[in-house]
Image (cartoon, rainbow, N blue to C red):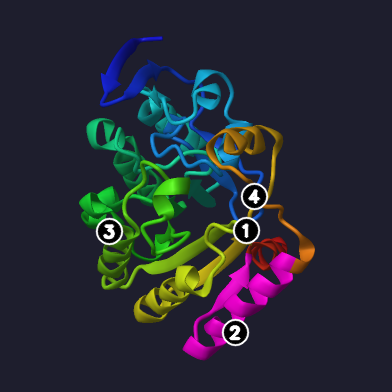
Amino acid sequence: MDNVTRLGNIIVKEIRVKSALSRSGLPEYDYALNPYLGCQHGCIYCYAMDFTRGEPGVRWGEVVYVKVNLIQVLLRDIRRFRPGIVGVSTITDPYQPVESRYKLTRRSIKVLCNAGYHVSIQTKSSLIIRDLDVISRCGRSVDVGFTITTMRNTYRVIEPMAAHPMARASALRKIASLGVETWIFLGPVLPGMNDKVEDYEPVIRLAKETNSQVIIDRFRPRPIVTSFMSRKLNPIYRVTRDWWRETLSSIMRLCKDYGVNCITAEDEWEISRK
């Protein structure tokens, strides 16, 4: 461990790593790049808790590890791997507040685009606007997705430290105006939390406005995240097949009404496998 500091209420620890790119377990990506371990947003539903080892996973939303030698290692990795699609990031938010200090995401995007890789960015942060210059230079080699679970202020219950959905919407509009391919991840949809029309109708409208695809996903319980949620929410509503069928049907009707391209996460995975 190189250095330990504080950023607000978050403990930030610098670490050194041996690899930057890893083979992705998600079919839509060839590789994953995660500049950080842990996430300051502290979203209570995040499956990344079950895949993040050590202190950042155990103390979710409280501890973040920074891979301070990431760029040096990435420069070596891009010479070893064949160019492909890189998911930035798959188990952390690449634009969480610590990125404003370390700029690892910004520098990684530059390296990857220059080396012929396609960069697929997913975030809940409006900090990404800082990097419009880098993103625009990537041209067709980049796409940007924003996770928006609801446009209502109730988002704070499940995403306590993430940017306000209105800030995400504003950032999405700016990026889409550059001609960059954009998408919205409407998920996870949680019973009793963000499964009402007033939660997702504004998201569909935003997708229409920005010509963004919408990827819809339900909450997928995992042991660690379920335990974490049980300490934060009371009660936790059960994800049932009937609930999801009715909710998804309602969302899809709105997508059809607005003329928005909406697919489920399962559909996306199937398309990626072909």
Residue assigned mark 1 = 191
> Relative to 37, is 235 on the left or the right?
right
| Distance from Cα at disc 1 to Cα at disc 4 | 25 Å
Residue drawn at point x = 41 percent, y = 79 percent? 205
Circle on res. 26:
4
In this orientation, which residue lies closer to the viewer: 54 or 182? 54
Indicate the secondary structure of the residue bearing disc 2: helix
Residue drawn at point x = 33 percent, y = 12 percent? 4
Q: Amino acid at mark 3?
A: Ala
Pointer 3 and pointer 1: residues touching (CB < 8 Å)?
Answer: no
In this orientation, which residue lies closer to the viewer: 211 or 248? 248
Q: Amino acid at mark 2?
A: Arg
In this orientation, which residue lies closer to the viewer: 83 or 12? 12
Residue 151 against residue 51 in the figure, above or below: below
Other-residue count near label 2 (Cα within 10 Å), few / some / many at <14 / 14–19 / ≥20: few
Q: Farthest residue to the front: give it.
A: 234
Indicate the secondary structure of the residue bearing disc 4: loop
Residue assigned mark 2 = 253
Range shown magenta: 243-264
| Distance from Cα at disc 3 to Cα at disc 1 | 25 Å
Q: Earlier in the sequence, mark 3 or mark 1?
A: 3
Q: Nearer the viewer, mark 1 or mark 4?
A: 1
Q: Nearer the viewer, mark 1 or mark 2?
A: 1
Q: Earlier in the sequence, mark 1 or mark 4?
A: 4
Residue assigned mark 3 = 167
